[in-house]
Every structure is written in C-alpha cells, then in structure tokens.
Amino acid sequence: MLFCFLIEYCLISYDVWTILQIIVGCIISLFFPGYFFINSLFFDDELFTSLEKFGLYLVLSICIIGLLGLFISYTFGISSCNILWTLLLWNMFFSITIVIKRYNLLK
C-alpha cells in the first residue's frame, strides 16, 4: 500500500523524464563502478557465482562512491559535476583495463 502511494506521488509530482533519470542514475551509480572494478581484478569467471558477483557489484559500488565522495570533498569540493566526472573517470579507467586484459588474453 505504501509502495503504491509512493509510486503515485512520484508520478504526480515529477515529470516522466525526471523519474527515468533517477532510475537510470541509480542503476549506473549502484552497479557500474563495482562491476568494472570486480571484472578488472577478478577476470576469471569461475571464481564466483553470478549471485555472489552481483552482490559484490552492489556493495563495492556503494563503497567506491563513498570513497570517491570523500576524495572529492577534500580536493575539489562536492558538486554534481565533480561527482559525474569522477565516476566517469573511474568507470573509464577500469573499463579500459578490462579491454586491455581481454586483448592480451586473445593474443
């Protein structure tokens, strides 16, 4: 009942694009930093089960975002632009390491 009330409140008070931005932003910030970090460290797929990997992705993403936020607050100051660029650089760095590892594995 409460969940339905919250959904109705969000649909009435927010635009559809705003709700879509919130959903996509939560998925990106709660999944990708941990996903890229785990896949760059543990490249072997047989080490963890898929459920363990998903749990590690979520938990590490929350920890990584907290640590990046702490780093940003002491260096640049917290703003939405700084958080966006820091997460972008983090994800790009570890996705490039994954691509390099896969390229070296194919050779």
Image (spheres, rainbow, N blue to C red):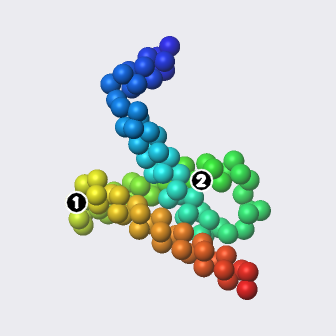
Q: Are marks 2 and 1 in contact (CB under 8 Å)?
A: no
Q: As drawn, which residue projects farthest toward the front? A: 16
Q: Is residue 39 left or right of residue 87?
A: right
Q: Earlier in the sequence, mark 2 or mark 1?
A: 2
Quadrant in the picture for residue 99: bottom right
Above or below 27: residue 78: below
Mark 1 sits on what residue?
A: 77
Specify the label residue 56 is tagged with: 2
Q: Residue at x 40, y 33 (%)?
A: 16
- Which amino acid does the dot numbered 2 rest on? Leu
Q: Residues within 10 Å of mark 1 (few under 14, many from 20)?
A: few
Q: Is residue 59 visible?
A: no
Q: Secondary structure at mark 1?
A: loop
The amino acid on which the numbered mark 1 sits, given as a three-letter code, is Gly
Q: What is the count of numbered marks?
A: 2
Position of residue 80 measured from the top left corner of the image (x, y, whole percent): 28, 53
Q: Is 91 placed above or below 102 here?
A: above
Q: Position of residue 36 (x, y in %)?
A: 56, 63
Q: Point out residue 39 in the picture as x, y percentages from the top left corner.
A: 62, 65
The C terminus sits in image quarter? bottom right
The residue carrying pointer 2 sits among few (fewer than 14), some (14 to 19) or many (20 or more) residues within 10 Å by Cα, namely: some
Quarter of the image where one finds residue 22 = top left
- In the figure, residue 83 lies in which quadrant? bottom left
Please identify, in this view, whether the residue under mark 2 or under mark 1 is nearer the observer. Answer: 1
Secondary element at tag 2:
helix
Q: As rendered, which of 49 and 35 lies closer to the eye?
A: 35
Measuring 23% from the left and 65% from the top, which residue is drawn there? 76
Q: Residue at x 34, y 29 (%)?
A: 14
Indicate the position of residue 84 as horizontal and vertical percent values. Answer: 35, 58
Identify the residue shown where x is 41% and y is 63%: 88
Q: CA distance from mark 2 to mark 1?
A: 28 Å
Reply above or below: 1 against 59: above
